[in-house]
Image: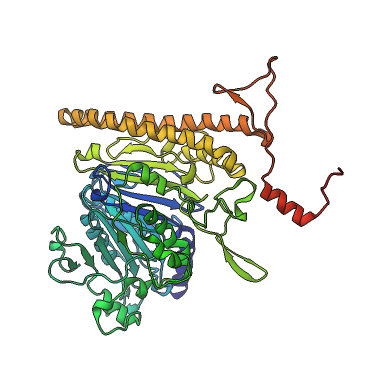
């Protein structure tokens, strides 16, 4: 049994290293331009394939079970009973406009539970299949880990619905082996400790692989409850909910020793902040906060890892309303506008690329170093912006703006939460990380991106132009589609769903076709490091049908300077 537990813990730690690399932003309805609730999610992993998951609604006979698979390895972990009915899920938004994202913060390795059946991925998908609101999703997640054990390490969740946005952090309680009177071996600490906080309306939040909850209000009769009082969860005045024994557990483990319970700090107890949590993780949150707040300079020393005492807040009130365009822009940040802009240091190479080869941490002459970790990164499998809108019926109100590959050159394409099928280009099973498919969006976008990685500053403007063309067009089309679908829904909900399925399918297909065209264009224009001349939208020819002489911009002065400093006069031509 002990050897089994050791092997499982090794597998869990391996999965943690694979998955510990995501970014989420949370926007409440009062903070958005049109009253939408938004959450975004970048699924950053070197093994994660970009596809749009789809689970139709279903009725389940009594006794049906659902297998839980480990999100990092796909290993079966165990089964849980199905409820009588499950809701449709498209990606990470369900038919009730409940959406969810996550990031892994790790925390104390000694608290891993090798016997936990439900890991963070299963928590998300099961909660989406069963919930009608963000609050209900929290209860479902808490009940699952209490009953079946939690099989991941420290995790943060974004949970939204048309009216509210919540942030939740969860930590396993470890494994304490106990033999019952019947001779059964059980885990006395099965379950997890957790805290969920509603982001105040009008505020925004974010998380990126670091625990963000510090102190929080304990029960005062109005604003917080414990999980022993679930009946009060649906009271709008309740803004904080937490595992009832969280402080007692932290004291028993020696993670919290202060006299007053009100001094309890979740992060300090279970995932103390260090240089990496600040510079590699919270820095990504700061970039979004810095775009929408005027006073974020005060946290510069914290996010650059110089002073870990002045942590950025869990949420802030923005100085303006946030739009869907803003959400897309947040996803594409590489610290531009700061002294750490990744296109400006030597790591950017000859073509000013914001991307860096992995691994994140490296050594030279026995000394440790790191690459800056920005939101946009090469290993993103997929990302999305979930939009929930309270003024529309659920089938029309929920949209997942979904993109594959890195956020810098993805295209966020709209898929309504009620569609009856996913277009083949984004469908689960159309290729995988080891199987190429010429009509899979993931491979089409990756093929183009690899050209971008070679010649970034030459090709990025062409890429951004088509990206903007498509995303702007889809936003305009959605306005019309909303109106048409709403009218149809009032007459016949089935016809509305058929219409939305057609639109989303057409949009998905169009994105891939247009991106293939762009890929072909870039190959012709930039082949062999030349740049073909263009005129009136066509490649230019001479008067006899041959190509006009291409431009040859060569290398920038920074490269020339470095070569001369390293080689002296080796390449100097005689006068």
As drawn, the residue found furthest toward the front would be 575
Residue 519: quadrant of the picture = top right
Viewer-side residue, 550 vs 523: 550
> Is any atom of residue 70 visible in this view?
no
* Colouring mode (rainbow / by chain / secondary structure / one colour): rainbow
Q: Residue 241 lies in what quarter of the image?
A: bottom left
- Relative height, residue 236 to residue 430 (above, below): below
Q: Is residue 428 visible?
A: yes
Towards the viewer: 155 or 470:
470
Q: Nearer the viewer, residue 113 or 211?
A: 211
Quadrant location, the C terminus: top right
Residue 459 on image: x %, y %: 57, 38
At x 34% / y 42%, what residue is drawn?
A: 324
Q: Residue at x 35, y 61 (%)?
A: 156
Q: What residue is shown at x 27% (from left), y 43% (from top)?
A: 33
Task: Judge from the rendering whether residue 92 lies leftward or rightward of residue 442; answer left or right.
Answer: left
Residue for point 24% across, 82% down = 260
- Vertical arrangement, residue 561 with respect to residue 430, above or below: below
Nearer the observer, 455 or 158 = 455
Tell me the quadrant of the picture where the N terminus can be found: bottom left
Place of residue 107 in the rendered image (x, y in percent of width and height, measured from the top left): 41, 70
Q: Position of residue 334 (x, y in %)?
A: 49, 52
Give the x, y percent position of residue 186. Answer: 32, 74
Q: Is residue 6 above or below residue 481?
A: below
Count of number-bearing discs: 0
Outermost residue to the right = 574
């Amino acid at each position: 049994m002990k050897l089994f537990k050791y092997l499982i813990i090794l597998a869990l730690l391996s999965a943690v290293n694979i998955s510990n690399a995501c970014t989420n932003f949370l926007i409440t309805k009062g903070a958005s331009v049109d009253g939408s609730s938004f959450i975004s999610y970048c699924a950053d992993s070197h093994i994660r394939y970009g596809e749009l998951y789809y689970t139709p609604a279903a009725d389940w006979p009594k006794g049906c079970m659902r297998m839980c698979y480990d999100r990092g390895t796909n290993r079966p972990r165990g089964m849980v009973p199905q409820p009588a009915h499950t809701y449709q899920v498209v990606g990470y938004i369900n038919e009730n406009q409940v959406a969810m994202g996550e990031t892994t913060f790790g925390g104390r390795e000694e608290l891993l539970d090798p016997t936990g059946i439900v890991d963070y991925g299963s928590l998300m998908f099961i909660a989406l299949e069963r919930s009608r609101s963000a609050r209900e999703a929290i209860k479902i997640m808490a009940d699952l880990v209490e009953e079946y054990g939690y099989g991941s390490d420290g995790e943060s969740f974004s949970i939204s619905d048309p009216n509210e946005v919540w942030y939740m952090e969860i930590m396993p309680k470890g494994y304490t082996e106990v033999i019952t009177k019947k001779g059964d071996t059980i885990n006395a600490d099965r379950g997890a400790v957790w805290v969920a906080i509603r982001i105040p309306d009008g505020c925004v939040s974010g998380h990126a692989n670091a625990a963000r909850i510090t102190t929080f209000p304990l029960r005062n009769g109005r604003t917080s409850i414990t999980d022993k009082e679930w009946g009060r969860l649906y009271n709008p005045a309740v803004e904080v909910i937490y595992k009832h024994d969280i402080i007692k557990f932290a004291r028993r483990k020696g993670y919290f020793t202060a006299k007053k319970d009100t001094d309890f700090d979740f992060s300090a107890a279970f995932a103390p902040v260090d240089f990496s949590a600040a510079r590699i993780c919270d820095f990504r949150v700061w970039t979004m906060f810095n775009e929408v707040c005027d006073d974020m300079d005060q946290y510069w020393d914290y996010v650059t890892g110089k002073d870990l005492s002045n942590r950025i807040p869990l949420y802030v009130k923005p100085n303006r309303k946030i739009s869907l365009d803003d959400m897309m822009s947040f996803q594409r940040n590489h610290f531009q506008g700061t002294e750490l802009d990744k296109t400006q240091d030597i790591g950017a190479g000859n073509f000013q690329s914001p991307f860096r080869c992995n691994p994140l941490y490296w050594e030279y002459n026995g000394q440790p170093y790191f690459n800056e970790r920005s939101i946009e990164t090469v290993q993103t499998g997929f990302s999305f912006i979930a939009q929930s809108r309270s003024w529309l019926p659920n089938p029309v109100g929920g949209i997942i703006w979904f993109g594959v590959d890195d956020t810098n050159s993805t295209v966020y394409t709209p898929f309504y939460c009620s569609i009856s099928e996913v277009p083949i280009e984004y469908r689960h099973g159309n290729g995988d990380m080891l199987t190429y498919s010429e009509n899979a969006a993931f491979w089409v976008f990756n093929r183009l991106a690899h050209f971008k990685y070679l010649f970034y500053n030459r090709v990025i403007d062409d890429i951004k132009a088509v990206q903007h063309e498509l995303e702007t067009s889809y936003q305009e089309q959605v306005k019309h589609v909303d109106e048409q679908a709403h009218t149809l829904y009032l007459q016949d909900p089935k016809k509305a769903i058929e219409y939305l399925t057609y639109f989303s399918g057409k949009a998905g297909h169009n994105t891939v076709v247009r991106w293939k065209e762009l890929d072909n264009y870039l190959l012709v224009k930039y082949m062999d490091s030349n740049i073909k001349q263009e005129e009136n939208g066509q490649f230019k020819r001479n008067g006899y049908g041959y190509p006009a002489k291409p431009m040859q911009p060569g290398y920038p002065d920074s490269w020339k300077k470095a070569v001369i400093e390293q080689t002296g006069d080796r390449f100097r031509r005689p006068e």
